[in-house]
Structure formats: structure tokens, C-alpha cells
Amino acid sequence: MKRICLIFEFPPEADFQLRSVLETLKNNNPGDEVYCLHGFLKNYRPGGRSPSRVLNLLWMYCLLPIHLLLKRPSWILVRSAPPGIQVWCSLWAHLFKIPTIAWIMDYHPEIEIRALEQRALFRPGAKILRQIDRIALNQLHGAIVLDDAMLNTVKQQAPNLDIQVHPTWDQYAEQENVPQNGSQGPNNNKLLFVYAGNLSSHHPLETFERLLQSLSKQSPETEIELHVIGTSNKGEERFRLLAQRGPIQLHITQRIPFHALKQRLVELNPHYGIVLMDEKTAGLFSPSKFAGYLSAGIPLLYCGPPKTNADKICQDFHAGISLPARTPETTMENLALEMTQAETIQGYQKGVIQAYQYFTGYNARTFANQLSSMIHSTPHEAAL
């Protein structure tokens, strides 16, 4: 009997993806013991530096080596969490010769390293931490990341490591319905945008604001309406300030349950769903807000770096607009004219269906199959 250990900060009950992977691995490996090692917190709590999260992390750091020594799992899947539980796990698992694959959702500790590099006093510490991360990565059997931007970033640290891409998924991936085309063009000279989810410091509004200014200049007769759903108080304030600086009709809705979000998006029937990402965080995060938009048949307006899944949706499937921060002003003005046209929006909506079918092809089953092929491949030889 094999022991397959999944390691994460929270239990499977707190995370849909982890829970679905655990269930799939159990179904695929009858007779084997498949279980999850996690901290004492039972539910997800935002804020990686909050006291409860820090204590939970310290508990895991103490528990992990003892567990590996006593339980000796056959192989491990460890999912990243701040400031990098996969690093700690890799170092100990290598000592016990346990094959380990890292599931890198957000690239900790590189996120923390780049923050430390902003201050001269902490740069030596950042250099040491990056070296530790490099060693830990090269001791892994493999890694799974969310998009090509993350793959390129991790490859810089571990060029010989088996790194594969598997996009994130959610409840929408289990639905077989194809999204229906929504609006055919600006309704009554209105252009509707929606932003669903949190607005953090990694979600800058500057590029979107530049686009709004171009829209106001190129299509002054078009009214711009922005619906914001489920963001934080600070995020709401940033959107209100944005609306004060430009001619925007702003509507804010408090957080609603996940299962009700798609219905709300369908009711709003906007022309574009907004996805934002800081260019400086390319390869560290992978925005996933597009899932709800695609399921509701909404094209994307993505403001962020290339090679992410949101960028792929726009570039490969032509299901929306991808705007890097350095988009020239003339390009922005031409886009402002084009994106209000009914035929342009209809073309994007056709792309949405193709993008939706592509991304809903990724789920817990495909992840488990990819994981199985990696774990049974020739072990990676560390190049330290």
C-alpha cells in the first residue's frame, strides 16, 4: 500500500481545488492511503501575515518533519502558501528520499524576495532566501504551475526541473453548458464593464483609467457604466476615486456567494469583464477572475503582463482585449473606437465560447493524470 500525501496550509474542506484533487486521487488509487496534512486552521483566513496565519504556518513547519519521519509517505504533492511551505517540504523530503511535486499557485517565496529587495538593508537576506529556494526547487521531482509566465519565472531558478502547466479550475469547470452570447453592442449608447473580486495592491487601475480617458475622447456620446462586485472596502474607495476623475456611472455590490455570481453576471450582461494584474508581478501570480466571465459569455478586458492565462484568452482565442501597461497612446485611442462596435464585441463573444471550452477541459481529473505521469517519470537529477 502506498501513502500519497497532500500538503497545504488549510484542509481540503476549505479549498475546492484541493478537495477535488484529493477525491480524484482516492478514486484513482484504490487500496492506497491518500490524505492531506494541513495546519490547525479549519477555514481560509485572508492575510498571510495575520497572527493566526503565522501561527498556523509555524505549526506546519514543526509538524512536517516529524510527520515525514514517522509516516514516510510514498510521494508528496505540496501546494504553495506564504512564505513557501514547498521549500521547507522539499528540503526535508529530499533528506528522506521522498519524491515531491510542488503545486505552485502563487510563487512564494519569490514574492517575498522581491519585496525584500526593495530595501537595501534586506537585500543580502533576499539573496540568501533565493539561493535556498533554488536548492529546494532543484531537489523536487517536478513542479506544476498555472501559466506560461509562471513557468518562465520558475525555470530561471531551476532550468532542469520538470515543470508543467495546468491552469486553475473551479466549480464552473464541472458545468457542461456552453455560455450564450450576451450583448451585441453598446445598449442605448452605453458600454458596460464589470469587475468581480478583490482589488489588491497587485491590481493597478492606471491602464484601465487610460482606456477610459481614450473612450471619453474618441466616443464622447458613449456612457460608461462600471459594476464592481465583492471587492474590499479599500478597493471600493479606489473605484470611487476613479469614478470621480472620469465620467463613469459606478455601481457597487457587496460580496455574493460563488454559485450566485454567474447568475448576477448574466443579469448584468456587460460587454467586458475586467482582469487586472501588476506588470511587476508577472510569473508570481496568475489571475483567475476570467473563469466567471467566460462562464457567463463575457469577453475580457485584461490589463497586465503577457503569457498569463488571461492574456492567452485574448491573444489565442480572440475573446477580449489584452492591454500591457506600456500600450502607446495611439493604440489606446484606436482601441477605444473599435471596442464599442457591435461587430467587434460579437467577434469577442465567439472567442469566449472557444476559450471556455478550452479551460473547462482542465479539472481535477486532468490534474491527477498529469500528476501521475510526472511522479512515475524518471526522477529529476538535481543540478545544484
Image (cartoon, grey):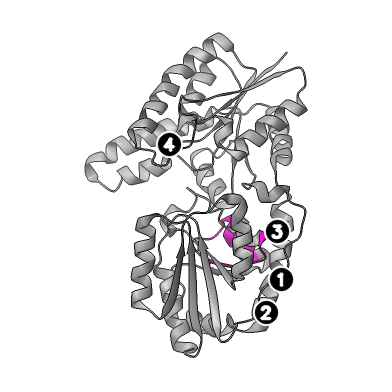
Residue 345 falls in image quadrant: bottom right
| Amino acid at pointer 1 | Asn
Disc 4 residue type (three-letter): Pro
Mark 4–mark 1 CB contact (< 8 Å):
no
Mark on residue 181?
1
Q: Which residues are magenta?
A: 295-315
Instruction: Give the residue at mark 4.
Output: 82
**Of callouts 2 and 4, which one flags the residue occurring earlier in the amino acid sequence?**
4
Q: Please tell me whether mark 2 or mark 4 is closer to you in this view.
A: 2
Q: How busy is the neighbourhood of tag 2: few (under 14 within 10 Å), some, or many (20 plus)?
A: some
Residue at 69% in and 65% down: 352
Dot in front, 2 or 3: 2
Where's residue 260, x and y in %?
60, 54
What x and y, as percent, mark residue 178? 76, 60
- Against 3, residue 83 (above or below) is below
- Residues under labels 4 and 3: Cα distance? 30 Å
x, y (%) of residue 21?
66, 34
The answer to which of marks 1 and 3 sits earlier in the sequence is 1
Question: Mark 2 highlights which residue?
Answer: 184
Do the numbered discs 2 and 1 sit on residues whose CB atoms are within 8 Å? yes
**To which residue does mark 3 refer?**
356
Instruction: Give the CA separation, mark 2 to mark 4.
Output: 43 Å
> Left or right: where does residue 273 sit relative to residue 4?
left
Residue 39 lies left or right of residue 185; in this view the side is left
Secondary structure beneath disc 3?
helix
- Give the quarter of the figure containing the N terminus: top right
Circle on res. 63: none
